Amino acid sequence: MDLGIKGRVALVTASSQGLGREVARSLAVEGARLTICARKEKPLADCADMLREMGAEVLAVPCDVSDEKQATDLVARCIEHYGTLDILVANCGGPPPGAFLDHSMERWREAVDLSLMSTVYLCRAAADTMIANKWGRMVLMTSISVKQPIDGLILSNSVRAATVGLGKSLANELGQHGVLVNSVCPGYFLTGRVQSLAKKNAQATGGKPQDLLDKWAAANVLGRVGDPDEFGPLVAFLCSERASYLTGAALAIDGGLCRSLL
């Protein structure tokens, strides 16, 4: 299927590794022109090299999207470089695990800045251009925890839910301008973050990381942890011409982990 986004300009944040990298790769397959970012320069450069080897045009910008100025400047650099911005995939790292009493107020503020305000900054900076173009796609990457809270991830459970509320509200406001906004809620994929969570949990409980990965795999209908390359094509579809009647959704891609009806 031709997704109709060849030549479109896409900005994918936190895209040097994990699910963000797979999104960038899937958009490159469709012929999008890319801006990617990450805090660490070496993984960012490696990702840019991989995408260029695929034939993609890539602008790589080191950036911490939890910082308002850096996030706003990132969008401005993308627009200056390409002359426009059509697609925004707002991704970020997840807040640290722990129970309610484990976290200081400062850690709560950091989680809000990382998982909510970064998305606010990016969407605000991108919205004017998309409205002027009367075409745009915003995809907010969150977590299955917004549909089914996960024990030991109270920061993610709380703050990412606010991101989905933001996405739904933006969809309502921007739809009249041809700008579609959707959220994606991944379950357990074999990324560095999931492996890190398994390792930290094992250290706290005296267990083995693989035992926890096996437990997560058994909890969903398919009985396995997802491969990151299964994630990118869904986001690419949401960014496409083919998703022209889809907005305001929060789509779970979790192997059937979430058992709710909606």
Image (cartoon, rainbow, N blue to C red):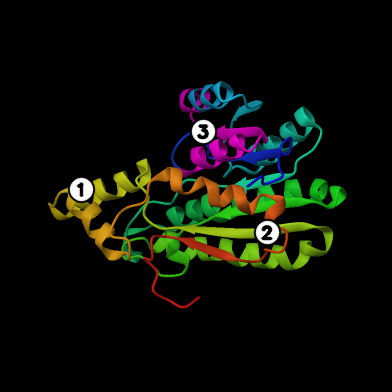
Badge 2 element: strand
Judge depth for marks 3 and 1 and give the one in front. 1
Determine contact: label 3, label 1, CB under 8 Å.
Answer: no
Comparing 256 with 65, the one in front is 256
Comparing 156 with 174, the one in front is 174
Q: Quadrant of residue 254?
A: bottom left
User: Horizontal and vertical percent for residue 154?
Assistant: 39, 64
For marks 3 and 1, give the CA distance: 27 Å
Q: Amino acid at mark 1?
A: Pro
Judge depth for marks 2 and 3 and give the one in front. 2
Badge 1 element: helix
| Relative horizontal placement of residue 208, taking residue 129 as reference (left or right) | left
Q: Amino acid at mark 2?
A: Val
Q: Quadrant of residue 148?
A: bottom left
Residue identified by numbered label 3: 39
- Over which residues does the magenta segment extend? 19-45
User: Horizontal and vertical percent for residue 162?
Assistant: 56, 65
- For label 2, the crowd category at 10 Å Cα-Cα, with few meaning under 14, some 14 to 19 and many 20 or more, is many
Residue 181's disc number = 2
| Relative horizontal placement of residue 76, taking residue 143 as reference (left or right) | right
Comparing 194 with 125, the one in front is 194
Residue 209's disc number = 1
Badge 3 element: loop
- In the rendered image, residue 22 lying in the magenta stretch gets the answer yes
Which residue is drawn at the image coordinates 52% and 45% (left, top)? 232
In primary-sequence order, the first of circles 2 and 1 is 2
Q: Amino acid at mark 3?
A: Arg
